[in-house]
Image (spheres, helix red, strand yellow):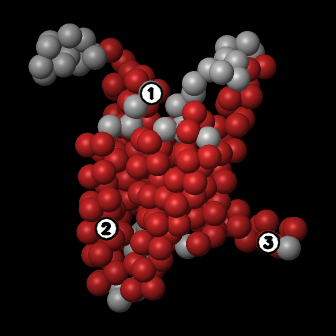
Amino acid sequence: MGRCSTCGESTGSRYALIEVACGVLFALIAWRFDSQPLAIPAYLWFVSAGLALAVIDLDTMRLPNVLTLSSYPAVGVLLLIPAIGYADWSAYLRTYLAGAAVFVIYAILVAVYPRGMGLGDLKLSGVIGMVLGWVSWATVVVGGFLGFFLGAVVGGGLMLSSRATRKTKIPFGPFMIMGAVVAIFVGNPLANWYTHTFG
């Protein structure tokens, strides 16, 4: 177990697990974008920032601006690299259109039911739309759906086990991030399966 460089207190095994999870995600991102290596840095940023945000949100029910807001220019600039390298300006345009679309949807949800979603979730939503948008519109839809689906499943499970009630506040950021990460890997296959099965 390590110790905090500032206060000297033990960090426990939790932080070691977080570091392992980050390493695994980095390896998976490198595998996922092996055909688009120039896009890898943008997604390494997202998974590392997303992991930190998920842990912070679970602990404090907050998504700090220093990570959410800084991710907009970071992702935008880092995805400019593959846009230039692969001359894929349609994907780059889709990145911003998806970011704006997801942000608007969350803004409507916050306006309609402010108790159900926080401003931190709203600030994070646009970044999630951007990283999903580079992949495809189908990935945007799947990632957005999975965030709400995972949140509903976990929330329902907590209520069934009497660990939460309808009034219990459950951080939504981790589910947004988890849904986006899953969609990055399987969003297109899931969308194709749904289309062929129910289309």
Look at the picture and state if 54 lies above or below 91. above
Direction from residue 131 to residue 187 in the image, left or right: right
For marks 2 and 1, the one nearer the N-term is 1
Amino acid marked by disc 3: Thr
Amino acid type for the residue under numbered disc 1: Met
At mark 2, the secondary structure is helix
Q: Bin the neighbour count of mark 2 within 10 Å (Cα to Cα): few under 14, some 14-19, many 20 and up.
A: some
Residue 12 falls left or right of residue 185: left
Disc with the residue nearer the chain's start (2 vs 3): 2
**Residue 193 x %, y %:** 77, 67
* Residue toward you, 141 or 85: 141
Per the model, the C-alpha gap separating discs 2 and 3 is 30 Å
Q: Which residue is mark 3?
A: 195
Per the image, the residue denoted by label 1 is 61
Q: Quadrant of residue 155?
A: top right
Location of the N terminus (image quadrant):
top left
Q: Is residue 57 left or right of residue 114?
A: left
Residue at figure coordinates x 62%, y 20% from the top left: 168
Q: Nearer the viewer, mark 2 or mark 1?
A: 1
Q: Return the residue at label 2.
A: 76
| Residue sticking out furthest to the front | 111
Image point (41%, 49%), residue name: 123
- Outermost residue on the bottom side: it is 87
- Give the residue drawn at x 26%, y 69%: 77
Quadrant containing the C terminus is bottom right
